Amino acid sequence: MKKISWRIVVVMAAIGAAWAFAYFEGGYLAYHIWDATQLLAGITLIQVLFPLQRVRIERHIRPDLATEGDSVTIELMIQANTWWPWAWVAVTDSLPATLHADHNPHFVVALWPKRTVTVRYQLAHVPRGIYTLKAPRIATGDVLGLWEKSRLATNDPMSMIIWPQTTALTHLGHVFQQWAGNTEMSRRISEDTSLLLGIRDYVSGDRLAQIHWRTTARTGQFKVKQFEPTTQPQIRIILDDMQAFQTEREWELAIQIAASLTDVAARYTQPLGFLWVGDGDQRIGIGTGRTHYETILNYLAALPRFHPNSHNSMTFIPDDAIPLWITMRGNHPALSDAVPVIRVGEELDQLEDLSFYLEHRLHRQAYGLSH
C-alpha cells in the first residue's frame, strides 16, 4: 500500500508541475510539455486498466518424447488479442525445482495488436523424469515502470516426459529366445507351415492357400491344413528395491537396463511386463503394443531418485511369466539360482556392455543352457 501511495504522489506531482509550468510560464515549450504529460498519463492509464486476460500463451515442447541427456527446446507463442499495442510484456516460465535450473526463463517483448511473438529457450542434458510445467506468469505496466501488474496465464499444466537412456541392442540374447520351457503363459503369433498338425473343416476366414485339395476332392467338402503354432515366451522384468543398490549411478544404470530391454522388446513385439519391488503391489501386466511399451517407459521415467534409506514393500512376486531380475546385491526371497539375473556392478558396470552381457554372461540355468 505504501508503494502505491508513493507512486500516486509521484504521478500527481509530475502532472501538477507540468500544469503549473504551462500556466505560469506560458509559451510553446511549456504547453508542449503539458500536452505530452497528459498523453503519457492517458497511455499509462489505458495500459494499467487493460485486462491481461487478453494475452494468450501457447507452449510447445520439442521433441514430444525425449531421452535422458537430450536437449529439449521449449517454445512460447505470445499473442495479444486486443486493438491496443503493449509497450512491454514480461513472460516468466515456471520450471519445476527437480530440473535444478539456475533460474526461470524470462523474456520481455513488445506486442502489437493481433500479432504473435515467439520466444524459445533450451534445456540441456535433462535428467530422466516426468516434469510438470505450470502456467507462465505474465506482467506488464507503464513505459516508466511506475505501475506493474501480473497474473498467471490460463495455460493448463503440461507434462514433459524424459525417458531413461537406452542402448541399441542388436540382438535379443538368450532372454527373449524361444524355448520349450515349463511356463504355460505363451502367446501364439503365427503358424509354422513346415509342421503339419492335421486336417480340419473349412471355416469362414481361412485362406485358400490352406485348402487341402486332395481331401476336399475325396470327401466333397472343403478341408484345410492346420499347422503347429509358433509361440513366444512371456517375460516380466523385475527391478529390485533401492536397498539392493549402493549408489545413485548403479540405481540409474539398472533403470537404463530395464528401459533398453523394453525398447528391444517393442521392436520385436515381445510380450513383456514390469514390476518394481519397491512399489507395493503395483505392477504392469504382460502385454504388447506401442501403448503398453510406452507405459513401461513412462513408469521407469517416473521412478524416484536414489535414496539409500528406502524400504522394501513387496514380498509377493507373481509367477505368470518368466522373471528377469535386475539387481546388484539383492537378497529378496524370490531370487534364486533358478531365475535369470542381471547383476549390476562388477558384472555389468556400463550400459554399452549390456548386449554382450545378455549373450555371454547372463545366468542361464533357468533356460537349460550352459555358460
Image (tube, rainbow, N blue to C red):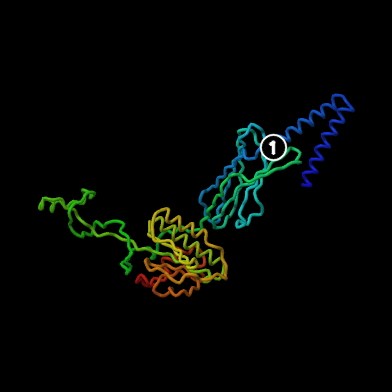
x, y percentage for residue 268? 38, 56
231 or 160: nearer the viewer: 160
Q: Residue at x 85, y 24 (%)?
A: 28
Residue 52 sits in which quadrant?
top right
Where 365 sits versus 90, above or below? below
Q: Badge 1 is on which residue?
A: 49
Q: Secondary structure at mark 1?
A: helix
203 or 2: nearer the viewer: 2
Q: Please count the marks in the image.
A: 1
Q: Amino acid at mark 1?
A: Leu
Residue 269 sits in which quadrant?
bottom left
Spot the residue most to the top.
28
Q: Residue at x 13, y 54 (%)?
A: 215
- Position of 338 compared to 193: left or right? right
Residue 38 sits in which quadrant?
top right
- Position of 367 compared to 262: left or right? left
Spot the residue most to the right.
24
Q: Residue at x 35, y 71 (%)?
A: 369
x, y percentage for residue 208? 21, 48
x, y percentage for residue 204? 22, 49
- Position of 115 compared to 350: left or right? right
Image quadrant occupied by the C terminus: bottom left
